[in-house]
Amino acid sequence: MPGESYARIIALVLGVGAPGLARPLRAGVFLMALRAQFLVNRPTRLSLIKRRAGWMLLGILWASLPAIAPAAAANEPSLIEKGKYISLLADCGACHTRTGGTPFAGGLPMSTPFGVVTSSNITPDPDTGIGNWSDEDFYRAVTDGIGRHREYLYPVMPFTSYTKMTRSDVLAVKAYLFSLKPVYAPRAPNNMSFPFDIRWTLVVWRELYFRPGVYQPNPRRSAEWNRGAYLVEGAGHCGECHSPRNIFGATETQRSLAGGQIGKWLAPNISADPRWGIGDRSVSELVTFLKTGAQKTEGVAFGPMAEVVHDSLRYVSTADLQAIAVFLKSGPERTQGLADQVASRSDLQHGQKLYLDNCATCHQDNGRGIPGVIPNLSANAAVTSAQPNDVIDAVLNGLRGSRSHVTMPGFGGALKNQDIADIANYVRAGWRNNGPTNATPALVASLRTPSSAGGAKSEAASAFDCPMVGVNGIPNILANSNEASYLVGANDTDMGNKINELLYRIRSDHPGVSFASLVNSMIAAYCPVVASQPGLTYAQKRALLARFNNQLVQRVEAMKAGSGDEIIAHVPLAPNIMQSITDAAAEKHETSAKWMAEVLGKATGQK
């Protein structure tokens, strides 16, 4: 019957009863069935018109299939779970989540030698995220560095490594991201210097330094080694941090994994070199360090690496971590020449005295620490690396605790630049260590931040959501920790007088500074001091910070701040409150800041 013929054609076109039918095969079956139906039933003119209309309808249905089928497959729990694992392994959330923001909603400013790039929203929001992106859009952006509108992406996005990822892995990540709750979060503009703000100039960079292509397994190596190579060079993008870069910001392939600089931090040499790299470490030692961020001969991960362990590597399977270790140990050895020795004998003696006075209580006078609680400084690869930057930063700003390891306080407010340089040199050369004694007061000064005196990087300050001073912050707002601590116990009158003294002193030292910068920088310096106060509840700390903020704003207004200044009071909010604000703003399709402004406007009777 003709009706049965049509039913069979439709079934074949739609793949009913043949879910495994490949798309090209289905297309061929469709054309053959169409031809057979035409020959068997020679049409009249009227029936031909009707049938053409039917074929047009089927064509529309067929065209819609590619959009329907992937969506159904993308909802498979196993695919979403795979995508979640790969996104953790690739540490996508680290760059696409601003401090205190909703995961994957972007907004994180990332400084480069060429300007500031702000990460994008990769939640499935259709307007500000990737909700309207096709599989091809996503795959091209991740592996080829070309955005949905065919714009070149800045290589801050590590597509130079992700290009080695398989299509199935990349689309699994997309499936996971599309399973998340959409977040309305418009992207802040980048702030790149000329000519790097012109994206088409990247065509030259790409031609010189970008080599696209999926990782090809080495048949002469084991499956484990190839898995490790795929992870290190692809999804894990280890070389993006642990390789030096040239003046154009491209990684130096001939010195890959020899160590690189990330802002003020130095990512160490992780090549197979036994002296400067990880060549003399066992696979099990490396796996322990990657999984936990601590190992007795490797030390404790801190800075960006501690974040990688916390946000990514601790979720990675032991088998994958072992594959990474196997690959790294079998790679080329990238050696580094010995750095200059600059510390004198008297400097080292002074450093030893300072160490015994300030550090030995925890790390012991022999530098061995307390296993599992206090990191060892003797025979610690992190201490003896080629450059002393990371040791200096630890002394300046302290270290957040990790698992069983306790938090280390910062000494930036208590010790001078020469003192910190001497301590760093002493621990790098003392006991069984043979690191170069190349820490200098000038290097310490360059690594100091506005938060060094107040300890803004302490665990307490992080838990209290203390704001960090950005690139425009004023250094040394509070000259030392004693000055900051005085403000905690002062009554309203004394606090007001002290704030006035600070304001006039800072304005004298920084002529032309805006009042907004004064307020924001002072709160950023004072907040960590409040956060670290013992015996106070969270509410009491918030009240203390609010009192300081009110006093500060009153003094600034009294100094007749210019009408063009915008002063923002940084008052920490509990994470659940901040999430509620974000959710409420998303429902209104607005940013959190705009939503809060509207709520405050209504509360004060203003539009």
Image: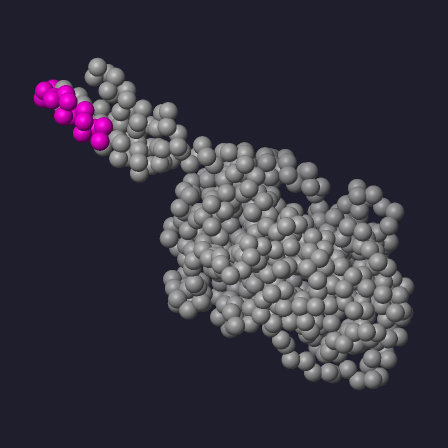
**How far across and how far down the image is residue 246, in percent?**
52, 72
Residue found at x 56% / y 63%? 239
The residue that appears at 76% across and 53% down in the rendered structure is 402
Would you identify the image quadrant in which residue 289 lies? bottom right
Q: Quadrant of the N terminus?
A: top left
Front residue of 190/346: it is: 346
Q: Which residues are magenta?
A: 32-46
**Can the viewer see residue 328?**
yes
Q: Nearer the viewer, residue 490 or 361?
A: 361
231 versus 51 height, above or below: below
Residue 523 can be seen in this image: no
Q: Is residue 422 left or right of residue 17?
A: right
- What residue lies at 71% left-to-right and 57% top-to-bottom? 284
Q: Quadrant of the C terminus?
A: top right
Q: Main secondary structure of the magenta part?
A: helix
Give the left or right position of residue 101, taking residue 346 as reference: left
Residue 117, given in percent of the width and then of the height, sits at: 52, 58
* Side (left or right) of 516 relative to 213: right
Q: Residue furthest left?
A: 45
Residue 600: x percent and y percent? Answer: 62, 38
The quadrant where residue 389 appears? bottom right
